Image: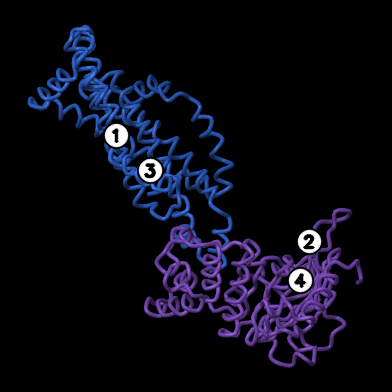
Amino acid sequence: MSLAIPRRRSAKQRLAIPRPLQGWLLPIALVVAWELLSRLGLVAPNLLPAPTTVLQTILTMARSGELFRHVGITLYRVVLGFGIGTLVATVLGALTGYSRTAHAYLDPLLQALRNIPSIAWVPLFILWLGIYESSKVTLIAVGVFFPVYLNLMSGIQGVDRKLVEVGKIYRLSQLQLVRRVFLPATLPAYLVGLRNGLGLGWMFVVAAELMGASQGLGYLLIDGQTTGRPAVIIASIVLFALLGKLTDSGLSAISQRLLYWQDSYGARG
Amino acid sequence: MAFSSRTTSPATVQNPSLSQDVVVALRDINLHFGNGAQRVEALRSVNLDLVAEDFVCVLGSSGCGKTSLLRVLAGYQPPTAGAVYIDGKSHNAPNAAVGVVFQRPNLLPWLSIAANVGFGPKMQGEPDFKLRQRVAHYLDLVGLTDASQRLPHQLSGGMQQRAAIARTLAANPRVVLMDEPFGALDALTRESMQLHLHKIWQQTQKTIFFITHDVEEALILATRIVVMHSHPGRIVQQIPNPFRNVLNSMSVSDLRTMPEFIRLRQRLVSAIHSVEGG
């Protein structure tokens, strides 16, 4: 009996797939199945083109330079909107989290605004800011604002009172207290807010570009629809997925570096 | 007003047996919360002197006002009447003269053990080379030199509490207040922590004010034992500990079996629980 245990474990180890590759298994299987279904003519290619066709479409667009123009402008909108939304959210969230007075004055209004579906602002933004970049960037910024604001504010309010007292015992100045205690203690919640905000940023760039744009990945969606090219639609969906995942992984990597000190379940070896 | 009946100056020693230099003096401390029917008398006429190298253990059941007394002593809670003097100077707000160790270590989770220990002096702008020496000294004192670069959550509860003690001592306070610092630890860890603390106290010669409800802990650690009762919170007994320093020559388990130890322990247990005026 006692000998059987190590033997069983080694058999399991031989079959084991390395942890980082486990997440790839299902998507690869799906893509292969999809390719097979298309090749066998089981789905209509004018509705669902094969993955290789989609890849080819992407490569053709890349060769003509069209791809980088669309990706570039979309990325630019997301980055700018994310930056502006984050900046405003950080200032207001820090204020309402740290000061009870600011919270009493500002938070009710912001909470009320939060309940407006952000897409509902679109007509107003277009009316005010025109159909060009500013209305799109503003919409993205609004989408990014709320998760960042909310996480930062509740993060500051949730800082362990005992740790703040430790800071006071060692006679930290207000500035030291913010920098040495509040900032590191709030960081986990803030980074979660940033990741949520970035996700919403990608969501709202699609909304903004669907509603009127002459370039960008969202425009490609509409273009593919009106010209009857499903490969273009799927190509731009795939690109959205890739870009979204890439930027999120970047933020996630930054989070993990900054939060090395956390004793969390997810960080176990 | 609280001193109206006294002719001596506040910092003057009243008890002739404590004629060494008084570090901390509590004078006629009264503390009330609320008004009218809700009025709670947390402390009534508490007088207490702590001399250098004193290790005073305050014993009492929960709610007897021992933590209130610590909060007044630390300067967190201004008394309704009376005053606290440290080295003859009136003490009414938290400052560097008083260090506090709580039941929880409250280490900053994002700092290494070494950075936690040096936190106070660093914030006061101590130069790096001096800070390093100081941190190394106090880490050594509590036996955490090997853990200096680790994070708080990587340490056991006892080690974390030792780091908290080192952090408090590193700020070089005149008096260290401890509020049931080993209350959250398991029995075995608690015992080893008591021995650790005893050694630390002998090496640093700090004045320590230690709150506990564990009679044995008081008998192992204290030079003097103070018993408090509730409603109103007040001191009902003060005795010198006959077993002070006995740990240098015998083990805790031997001490526990001494008939005198058992008798005094029994007496203190009943003193804690005796009815009003007992």
Q: Amino acid at mark 1?
A: Lys
> Chain letter of disc 3?
A
Q: Circle 2 sits on which residue?
A: B63
How far apart in space, not on screen, are marks 4 and 3 (Cα)? Answer: 54 Å
Q: Which residue is mark 3?
A: A87
Q: Which quadrant: the N terminus of chain A? A: top left
Model colouring: by chain
x then y, percent, for residue B261: 77, 79
Give percent across and percent down for residue B53. 65, 86
The chain carrying label 1 is A
Specify the amino acid type for callout 3: Leu
Label 1 secondary element = helix
Above or below, B276 against A84 in this view is below
Q: Amino acid at mark 4?
A: Leu
Q: Please, which chain is the residue tagged with disc 4 on? A: B
Tally the numbered discs.
4
Amino acid at the residue labelled 2: Gly
Q: Is residue A253 above or below residue B255?
A: above
